């Protein structure tokens, strides 16, 4: 008697690292139910496609819709049998999407995993909570410490899609970290909508520094990296822990959004420019070795030329090690959507480009000062000519890389090496093994 072939399930992930973690959890649950599941494989001819969507800004929403339509066409043509959509866009626009794209077999929100699994006759297995299949390079992984957000930022639709802040229990996070390390992970990026708010809901106080202490004790975990720290009410004790613990990277991703007090008030950020300047100074006073990464928004409603020049001066003064900037996206359901989107798109782009041109000069100058110094570098990948790695001051995909010519010697991806920096560029540095 011929055995029926398992249906092949392919998961497509769009958006941020938090979405990637969600896709990895879906994969883990399906694998735990003995399903044949893959991530973004183009060579497997899947029977089923699950699209994990992003709904953060206009560009991301359009990419999600285009991806759904592409696979809906494949279903119409009989190339795939079933199509499911989950994630942020589905959470936010479920009813509209159902009527507009009837080819989709089911739309699910950000917290509907048990319902999604039922389509595959799979049960949500609580015993898999501390385990996760990773889709990144095997030596690093993202670890989500909480879900949702309680902040009232006027421009942000995340609470509409992700709900209120819910911290993951500390013992579950530590267990997941241990399991990741046992599978070869050497670096973990801690992510959340607001990492510094961790613990308030379940422990009734901020517990991020305690979490960092516990994670730093996980044997075999070489690097711990902090992303998405909110500046208002920032607990500087985490910088003390960072300085004390050798395996916590001297790196902080702290999205500040603007450099004008007037704009920060309109954005409902709960902080002023003066307090932001003071926070940056205090962080650097405690830990002079720290690399600060931030994110800004250009062209929020009400932003004048004067406000923009304040932000430009703020970036020039602050000398951030890493910086990204978005042009404002007018998101329905947010407080900012009630305001007139009064900054033209070309002005938004122009302001964004000016900030990035400034940051390029800052980065080039900072990188030039690294020439002649030696850094511990984690090797991420290689091609025919070069190895590409990162220092503790760089997160994967968004930050600088260290380039080492392959003619130097054979290096193993996923291992650490001491690299002497011999040259620099705007966003990369070049070196050789000591």
Image: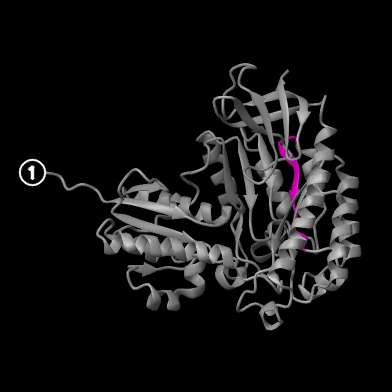
What segment carries the magenta color?
246-257
- In this view, the residue in front, 279 or 348, is 348
Does residue 252 belong to the magenta stretch? yes
Decide: is 64 above or below 145.
Answer: below
**Residue placed farthest to the left in the image?**
1
Decide: is 152 above or below 314.
Answer: below
The image shows a total of numbered marks equal to: 1
Residue 244 % position (x, y): 80, 39
Residue 329 % position (x, y): 65, 69
- In this view, the residue in front, 219 or 90, is 90
Q: Quadrant of the C terminus?
A: top right
Q: Quadrant of residue 249?
A: top right
Q: Residues within 10 Å of mark 1 (few under 14, many from 20)?
A: few
Residue on which the image places disc 1: 1
Secondary structure, mark 1, is: loop
Residue 92 % position (x, y): 52, 73
- In this view, the residue in front, 336 or 368, is 368
**Residue placed farthest to the front in the image?**
346
Decide: is 248 above or below 264.
Answer: above
Q: How is the protein colored in the picture?
A: one colour
Residue at 17% x, 48% y: name it.
4
Residue at 49% x, 70% y: name it.
91
Say whether residue 118 is visible.
no
Does residue 119 belong to the magenta stretch? no
- In this view, the residue in front, 333 or 174, is 333
Say whether residue 366 is visible.
yes
Q: Quadrant of the N terminus?
A: top left
Decide: is 102 above or below 125.
Answer: below
Q: Is residue 313 left or right of residue 385?
A: right
Q: Is residue 379 left or right of residue 28?
A: right
Residue at 35% x, 58% y: name it.
123
């Amino acid at each position: 008697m011929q055995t029926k072939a398992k249906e092949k399930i392919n998961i497509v992930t769009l958006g941020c690292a938090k979405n990637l973690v969600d896709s990895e959890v879906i994969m883990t649950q399906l694998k735990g139910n003995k399903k044949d599941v893959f991530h973004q494989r183009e060579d497997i001819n899947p029977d089923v496609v699950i699209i994990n969507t992003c709904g953060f800004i206009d560009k991301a929403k359009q990419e999600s819709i285009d991806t759904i339509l592409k696979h809906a066409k494949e279903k119409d043509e009989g190339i795939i049998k079933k199509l499911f959509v989950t994630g942020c866009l589905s959470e936010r626009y479920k009813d509209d999407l159902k009527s507009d794209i009837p080819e989709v077999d089911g739309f699910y929100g950000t917290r509907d995993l048990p319902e999604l699994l039922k389509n595959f006759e799979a049960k949500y297995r609580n015993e898999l909570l501390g385990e996760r299949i990773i889709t990144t390079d095997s030596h690093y992984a993202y670890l989500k410490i909480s879900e949702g957000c309680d902040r009232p930022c006027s421009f942000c639709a995340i609470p509409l899609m992700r709900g209120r802040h819910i911290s993951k229990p500390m013992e579950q996070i530590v267990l997941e970290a241990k399991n990741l390390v046992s599978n070869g992970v050497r670096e973990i990026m801690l992510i959340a909508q607001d990492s510094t708010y961790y613990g308030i809901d379940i422990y009734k106080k901020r517990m991020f520094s305690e979490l960092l202490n516990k994670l730093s004790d996980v044997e075999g975990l070489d690097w711990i990296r902090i992303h998405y720290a909110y500046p208002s009410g920032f607990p500087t004790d985490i910088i003390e822990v960072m300085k004390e613990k050798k395996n916590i990277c001297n790196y902080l991703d702290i999205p500040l959004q603007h450099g004008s007090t007037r704009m920060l008030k309109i954005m409902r950020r709960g902080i002023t420019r003066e307090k932001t300047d003071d926070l940056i100074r205090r962080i650097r006073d405690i830990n002079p070795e720290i690399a600060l990464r931030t994110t800004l928004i250009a062209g929020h409603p009400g932003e004048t030329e004067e406000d923009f020049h304040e932000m430009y001066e703020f970036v020039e003064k602050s000398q951030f090690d890493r910086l990204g900037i978005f042009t404002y996206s007018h998101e329905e359901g947010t407080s900012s959507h009630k305001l007139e989107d009064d900054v033209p798109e070309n002005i938004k782009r122009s302001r964004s480009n000016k900030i990035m041109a400034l940051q390029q000069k800052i980065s080039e100058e900072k990188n030039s000062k690294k020439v002649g110094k030696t850094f511990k570098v984690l090797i991420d990948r290689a091609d025919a000519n070069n190895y590409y790695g990162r220092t503790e001051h760089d997160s994967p995909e968004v930050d600088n890389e260290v380039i080492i010519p392959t003619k130097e010697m054979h290096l193993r991806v996923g291992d650490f090496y001491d690299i002497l920096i011999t040259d620099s560029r705007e966003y990369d540095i070049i070196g050789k093994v000591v």
